[in-house]
Image: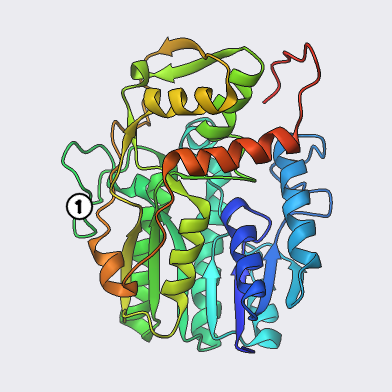
Amino acid sequence: MTIPWMVTGAAGFIGSRLALHLAQRGYTVHACDWADDSGCTPLEPDPNSTASRLRAARMAAVRQASGVQWQRLDVAHPTALLDWMASVRPERVIHLAAQAGVRHSMQAPQDFVASNLVGFANVLWACHRHQVARLLYASSSSVYGMRSEAPFEEADRTDRPQSFYAATKQANEAMAFSFHAQYGLQSLGMRFFTVYGPWGRPDMAPYLFAQAIRRQKPVTLFAAGELMRDFTYVDDTVAAVTALAHQDARWLGAQVVNVGHQRPIRVIDFVQVLSELLQTPPIIENAPMQTADVALTCASESRLLSLVDAWPDTPLKEGLGRFVQWLQGWEPLGKGDHSTRA
């Protein structure tokens, strides 16, 4: 398999896992990220932060893989992606580079403008100019906003985002639809649902909860842990993205698709499974529901199954077991290590 595939955001959680998966399957992978060798980004310049250390380690693994060509690149730069794509000529572009995080967007919404809006516009333009056959890009379950009806269907309204992060992803979908209407660009927005697993983001609940439990620090649960999330194991997500990017995937035009298993659980139950695997009881500290949060995420997987037939479904306890095993190896705690760093 020599068809060139391009993956942006390849030092990220899903992007790194995807780039390695494609390389292992024999594809030529052109991977890029804006992080430097120490994992630092313009928004996170501390090489000693957990996020930077994770990016550096993910990036090192991807760059060492056979079949991967690496490029440091900021998609928000006006011509960087356009110029790079001219030399690569990819048939598939999987765009995962973005600033993520509902809560971070509450604190610093301007951090999301360059990567998520300007950067995505540059991706669309470059794909159009270089006649890319298929563009797949990361959207989010956050676009559904506050809903009580489940499961979430792709045809449901998404015009009431609860966070600026969600608004940028909603904008991406609209931008992609416009490029299909104007230029015929084939695109698929993938609405990811709470992806977790080894090498996961340190700002997300699985990592934060696990580290708090391990260090015998309080686990902060919003809305008494009654919020429900459709957790999706990272390797399941990568398998779905790979299948959707394949030429046999049954989609045309500009579409969106949920990538989730339609199996939400309460966050308090998630914490309980995690604590059992860590063999440490959690110290629960309740807090009010945050303004930008939503009470429920629940993916209908009907459209996804109509496009790819089947995709893996890793049970939560099995996926969390792999995550715990990785975390304990990645950052072992010394005796008496009860620091608050997460």
Along the horizontal axis of the image, is 120 left or right of 214? left
**Which image quarter is the C terminus in?**
top right
Along the horizontal axis of the image, is 231 left or right of 81? left
Q: What element carries label 1?
A: loop
Residue in the foreground of this view, choosing between 6 and 336 = 336
> Is residue 79 visible in the rendered structure shown here?
no
Q: In which quarter of the image is residue 26?
A: bottom right
- Residue 185 image position (x, y, % from top left): 40, 82
- Residue 103 image position (x, y, % from top left): 48, 32
**Which image quarter is the N terminus in?**
bottom right
Residue in the foreground of this view, choosing between 321 and 177 = 321
Does residue 126 sit above or below 20 in this rendering? Answer: below
Residue in the foreground of this view, choosing between 244 and 81 = 244
Q: Residue at x 72, y 44 (%)?
A: 54
The residue pinned by badge 1 equals 157
Q: Which residue is drawn at 64% across and 89% down?
A: 2
Residue kind at label 1, given as amino acid type: Arg
Does residue 61 sit above or below 176 in this rendering? Answer: above
> Is residue 331 visible in the rendered structure shown here?
yes
